[in-house]
Amino acid sequence: TSLVPSLSVRGEFPAIAGWHYLDSAATAQKPQAMIDAVTAAYARDYATVHRGVYERSAVMTQSFEDARGAIARFLGAGSPNEIVFTRGATEAINLVAQSLPRVGRDRVLVSALEHHSNIVPWQLAGYTLDVVPLTDDGRIDLDAAESMVSERHRVVALAHVSNVLGSILDATRAADMAHSKGALLLLDGCQAAPRIPVDVSAIGCDFYAVSGHKLYGPTGIGALWGRTALLEAMPPYQGGGAMIDRVTFERTTFLPPPSRFEAGTPHIVGAVGLHAAIDWIGKVGLDAIHAHEAALVAECRSALRGMNDIQLFGPADSAGIVSFAMRGVHPHDIGTILDDEGIAIRAGHHCAQPLMDRLGVPATARASFAAFSDSSDIEALLRGLDKVRRIFS
Ligand code: PMP
């Protein structure tokens, strides 16, 4: 018998009927409420935002700005004006890397488990990276970080939850660590925001990046939260319509944040869909989702731990993500055989090649859970791994 509390939301996800979807860390499936909101936004309410003089556009503008407010509340931000709509976490981090004034500092402190999107933007912007090592159980080693952070670091940029190991960062301690040397803390909240309650004010971080599609919302929409004073000190990231105050051929002035960072027609329906997704998460409750995923992780890890050909990565209290390897079998073969059984896992480097190097493997197999996952997914996974074993023995 299973100890996993049932959230009973599986039936709200039409695209997973008859399928064992264990790849929510890549992208979450969508609840009907979110799909309905997107459909209504296109089929009934559609118009542009910010520019129309007609009623429909004013209503859509209100919906778009309501979405900003909902994201602000969801993340514990002080004001909706601290929320910049982006294409996702990747664009959010690129925005900070490109626009943040350096104030004479030329280094960024990252960790060994970062996603490429929290490594490459800093490199492109010309920063030198220092890399915080991991503890043996796969957490960011904050003792080491405390001894590494210096007056040369402009930003400490860390994953709030690892997309490979599921390890949860002690974010408050990370903020104190960064601030002790005058550095800013940017948290990559891609995996944390769908899995644990987030309150940027309580954490004391300076920037927070999320992707809508991991939050049960649409692709192509995400958000950057930044402190007002920091956003105000940042020049525009891209130029175009909607971000200007006055344009002449000689000189252009810009709107205040967040508009300054939102050049062009935004992903209007994406914002509406993300709002619906966040409302859906609020209805289920992030505490309940976290408890549900923690129970699934415990069940999955305890079953895999009993198999002597399986190597488990990451800490026991992972937030909904279980990475593993099977002796003598490449993770891609595991993924292909499981796919034949109607089970979707991720196999590969998970956009974290430096972490694979540290773990000493080319790739891992990764099962990741969400609110709609249940024990039947784990049972299917275990049956699938038995089949992998039979084929390879
Ligand atoms: N950071 C982490 C930890 C992630 O898991 C991901 C997505 N796999 C990203 C950043 C990038 O997100 P996106 O591709 O949605 O911009």
Image (cartoon, grey):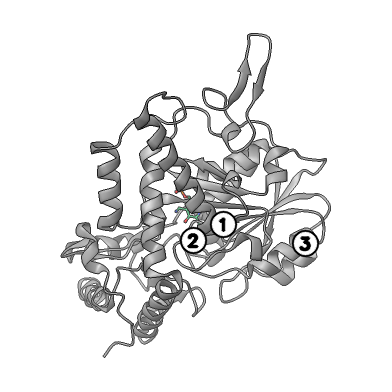
Q: Can you see residue 219? A: no
| Amino acid type, residue under disc 1 in the picture | Glu
The first of marks 3 and 1 along the sequence is 1
Q: Residues within 10 Å of mark 3 (few under 14, many from 20)?
A: some
The tag on residue 320 is none
Q: What residue is pinned by disc 2?
A: 193
Q: What secondary structure is found at the residue carrying circle 1? A: loop
* Residue 55 image point, x, y percent: 36, 30
Q: What secondary structure is found at the residue carrying circle 2? A: loop
Q: Residues within 10 Å of mark 2 (few under 14, many from 20)?
A: many
The first of marks 2 and 1 along the sequence is 1
The tag on residue 114 is 1
Q: Mark 3 near mark 1, Cβ–Cβ under 8 Å?
A: no
| Amino acid type, residue under disc 2 in the picture | Ala
Q: Mark 2 near mark 1, Cβ–Cβ under 8 Å?
A: no
Is residue 359 shown above or below 40? below
| Amino acid type, residue under disc 3 in the picture | Met
Query: In which quadrant will I find the C terminus?
Result: bottom left
Q: Which residue extends farthest left?
A: 18
Q: Is mark 3 within 8 Å of ligand 1?
A: no
Which residue corresponds to the image point at 36% horizontal and 40% vertical from the top-left?
269
Q: What residue is pinned by disc 3?
A: 148
Which residue corresponds to the image point at 83% horizontal and 40% vertical from the top-left?
104
Which residue corresponds to the image point at 46% horizontal and 50% vertical from the top-left?
211
Q: Is mark 1 within 8 Å of ligand 1?
A: yes
Query: In which quadrant will I find the N terminus?
Result: bottom left
